[in-house]
Image (cartoon, rainbow, N blue to C red):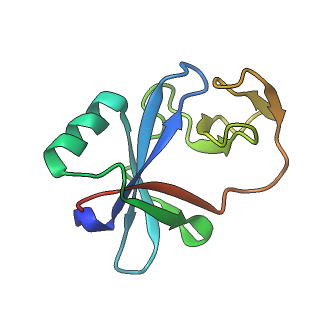
Amino acid sequence: MSGENSVFIKARCLSTKKIYYIRYDYNAMHRWILSEAINEEEYRNKICSNHYSEDNKRNVDLSNAQIGPQYKGCPYCGNRDFVTCSTCSELHCFNGNSDGFTCPSDGIYHKLSGGYISSLKGVRAGQ
């Protein structure tokens, strides 16, 4: 997958409160594919070695996105789902088995509203 077609999005583990990054790749079928989740150190190493720019953001339309077979979930707890906090707007891994979550950033318990995440913005790779 070409670097220009990859986007890294910051997320936080609800269990460990550690930051990690998920990578979406844009494929030939014009679809975003969730490809991997890496810890913050791996992400920093990729940024330095591949000239990714924190200033170069790209929107990822999730309406047609898919999870790739290589995606293993959060690198810390293995959760494969996501939620966003309505207060801080951070993306968090989620186990999908409860009616809400406590955001590690604001410390507030948020009940799920039944919506879905339609798009995310992330660091565009290879630019």
**Which residue appears at 46% of the width and 74% of the height?**
31
Residue at the location (71% across, 39% down)? 85
Residue furthest to the front: 55
Q: Is residue 59 visible?
A: yes
Q: Residue furthest bottom?
A: 29
Q: Is residue 46 above or below residue 51?
A: above
Q: Is residue 1 visible?
A: no
Percent x, y of residue 33? 44, 63
Q: Position of residue 47 (x, y in %)?
A: 24, 44
Instruction: Give the total number of marks visible in the rendering.
Output: 0
Q: Residue at x 54, y 18 (%)?
A: 16
Residue 33 as seen in the image, left or right of residue 108:
left
Taking the image as shown, residue 91 lies to the left or right of residue 107, namely: left
Q: Is residue 15 left or right of residue 44?
A: right
Residue lying farthest left? 49
User: What residue is rendered at 56% in x and 35% in y?
Assistant: 79
From the top left corner, tell me how far across and down residue 25 is, in percent.
37, 63
Estimate the x, y position of residue 120 in percent, counting from the top left. Answer: 56, 57
Q: Viewed as shown, does residue 123 lie left or right of 82?
A: left
Dividing the picture into quadrants, the one containing residue 100 is top right
Q: Quadrant of residue 127?
A: bottom left
Quadrant for the N terminus in the image: bottom left
